[in-house]
Amino acid sequence: MENNILEINNLHVSFDTFNGEVKAVRGVDLKLKKGEALAIVGESGSGKSVTSKSIMQLNPKPAARIKTGEIKFEGKDLAKYTDKQMESIRGKEISMIFQDPMTSLNPTMTIGKQIMEGLIKHQNMAKTQAKQRAVELLNLVGIPNAETRVKQYPHQFSGGMRQRVVIAIALACNPKVLIADEPTTALDVTIQAQILELMKNLQSEGDTSIILITHDLGVVANMAQRVAVMYGGKVVEVGTVDEIFYQPKHPYTWGLLSSMPRLHEKQDGLATIPGTPPDLADPPKGCPFAARCPYAMKVCTEHMPEHLEVSDTQTAACWLLDERAPETEPPETIKSVR
C-alpha cells in the first residue's frame, strides 16, 4: 500500500461569477507521498493554484466552492471541514508559501511577531520562547543578524529576504505538508537558487512533503521527484521527473518541454503552443487540449480521454495512447531533451 500523506480524489471546484459558473478544477486526482516533492506545472489558468488552495480551503468564499471530491489528509477529508475545523490544520499541519511575499506579510507588524503568532497559537509557546524560536527560524532560512532583524518590519527587507521570512512563517510549526506556490517568482537567480536549496534541505532533513507549483521546468527538474501536468482544470499527465522529461506521452507536455530554452543548442526563437486555453465557463466536452493539439482526432473533440497507464508510476489522459490510435512520434524538440 502506498504511503500517502495526502490524496485528492475527483476534485471539482467552481467559481460563481457574473458570467456564470467557471469550472476551474474538473475531476483532479493527485497523491502526495510522505517526504516527497510533487511539482504541479501548467499554464496560467490551468487550475494549479486553485487545486492547492482548496487543500487549505483558501479560495475566496462564497464565490469559490468545492462541488464534489475528497481531499484526504492522513485519512481525514478536509473538503468536509468547516473554517473553524481548518484552523487546527492551517499553519500547523499544512502550510503555504504564497507567490507574493509583500502581500503575504502584515506591514504593520514586526517580522518577529508574525512568526510568533503560529507558535503561540498552535504550539502553546510562551512569548519569550516563541521569540527565541523566531530568531532560530530566521537563522535557519539564512537571514543574518536575526536578533536585530526579528524586530524589523517587512518594508525593511528586500524581496528575497521577505520570501525567506514567508518560508520561516510556513515552517514555524513543523508542518507535515508544505505548499509552495511559485516560491521564487520575481527573485534573481542567485536568491532563487538559495531558496530552492533551503527547501530541498528542509525536505530531506525534516521529512516534509512538498507540493511545488511553478511555471519553471528548470525548478521542477531540480526540486521534484514526481510531476503532475495540468491543463484546462484537469491533470493530463503524471509521472516521475525522468518520465515527464525524457518519456512524456501527452502532446501538451511535449509543448511545454519544447518551449524550454536549451543553452547547448542554437535556436532561432522559442517554440510556443499556438492558440489559447479553453474557456472554463464553457469547457469543451472532449479533451481540453484538442483545439490546440496538432495530433487531435475526431474522438478528441467529442469524448474526454481517461488516464491510461504507461508504467507503474506514469499515466496520461490522451487518446493517442489508445491501441486503436495511429502511432505518433513526439516532435524533434522533445527528442533533443532526451
Image (cartoon, helix red, strand yellow):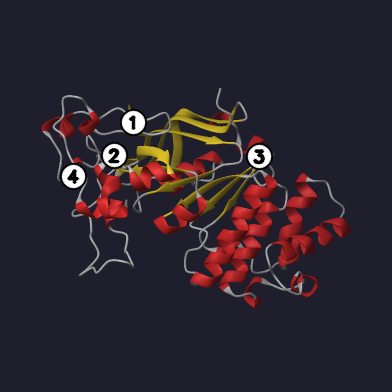
- What distance separates the C-alpha of mark 2 from that of mark 1? 8 Å
Residue under the image location 59 percent in, 54 percent down: 200
Whether residue 215 appears in this view of the structure is no
Q: Give the residue type that dot 1 points to.
A: Val
Given the image, on which type of amino acid does mark 2 rest? Lys
- Residue beneath the point at 69% across and 72% down: 153
Contact (Cβ within 8 Å) of mark 2 with mark 1: yes
**Does residue 256 appear in this view?**
yes
Q: Which of the two residues, 295 or 174, is positioned nearer the viewer here? A: 295
Q: Is the residue 179 above or below the residue 151 in the image?
A: above
* First in sequence: mark 2 vs mark 3: 3
First in residue order: circle 1 vs circle 4: 4
Residue to which mark 1 is pinned: 310
Q: Which of marks 3 and 1 is nearer the N terminus?
A: 3
Residue at the left extreme, as displayed: 298
Callout 2: helix, strand or loop? loop
- Mark in front: 4 vs 2: 2
- Check disc 4 and report its element: helix, strand or loop: loop
Question: For mark 3, what is the residue?
Answer: 89
